[in-house]
Image: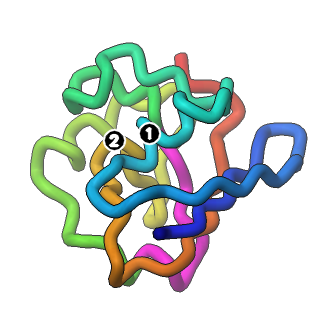
Amino acid sequence: MTKVTFVTRGSAEISVDVAPGVSVMQAATDNGIRDILADCGGQRQCATCHVHVRVPDVTLLPIMTEDEDEMLDITACERDADSRLSCQIIASDDLDELVLELPERQR
């Protein structure tokens, strides 16, 4: 299991355990994390699951695809070097823990 801590807009920290093979976006929606909208259901088409991965955790993630990189250009809040789409972060046995800061808005 991967422990994922979501830091909400109000600075609340919500931690959930995510089974291997499950996307962080799916875990967020399953656990009522309202700051992840996931309008497209994880199809890399809406950018409403934008998160900021706290350094150094971002180095543990797979390299971003070109599609994800393009979607991050249209996020509601400015992207930065640690921006990712949570639908593209998949829990695995190699990924013990992640801390994700949620942007002020997704639309």
Is 71 in the magenta?
A: no
In the rendered image, which residue does mark 2 sit on? 87
Q: Residue at x 33, y 41 (%)?
A: 87
Q: Nearer the viewer, residue 24 or 81?
A: 24
Q: Is residue 80 above or below residue 73?
A: below
Q: Position of residue 41 (x, y in %)?
A: 31, 21
CB contact under 8 Å: marks 1 and 2: yes
Q: Earlier in the sequence, mark 1 or mark 2?
A: 1
Which region of the structure is painted magenta? 50-58
Q: Which mark is residue 56?
A: none
Q: Amino acid at mark 2?
A: Cys
Q: Position of residue 80 (x, y in %)?
A: 48, 57
Spot occupied by residue 42 in the image (x, y as percentages of width and height): 29, 30
Q: Name the residue nearer the viewer: 23 or 48.
A: 23
Residue 11 locus on image (x, y percent): 87, 49
Is disc 1 placed on a helix, strand or loop? helix
Q: Secondary structure at mark 2?
A: helix
**Residue 53 among magenta residues:** yes
In the figure, 59 relative to 31: above or below? below
The colour scheme used here is: rainbow
Q: Which residue is mark 1?
A: 25
- The amino acid beneath tag 1 is Met
User: In terms of depth relative to the viewer, which is nearer, 78 or 64?
Assistant: 64
Task: Please give the name of the residue rendered at 44% of the width and 65% of the height, measured from the top-left corner.
Answer: 81
Q: Horizontally, is 42 left or right of 48 in the view?
A: left
On screen, 18 above or below 81? above
- Total numbered labels: 2
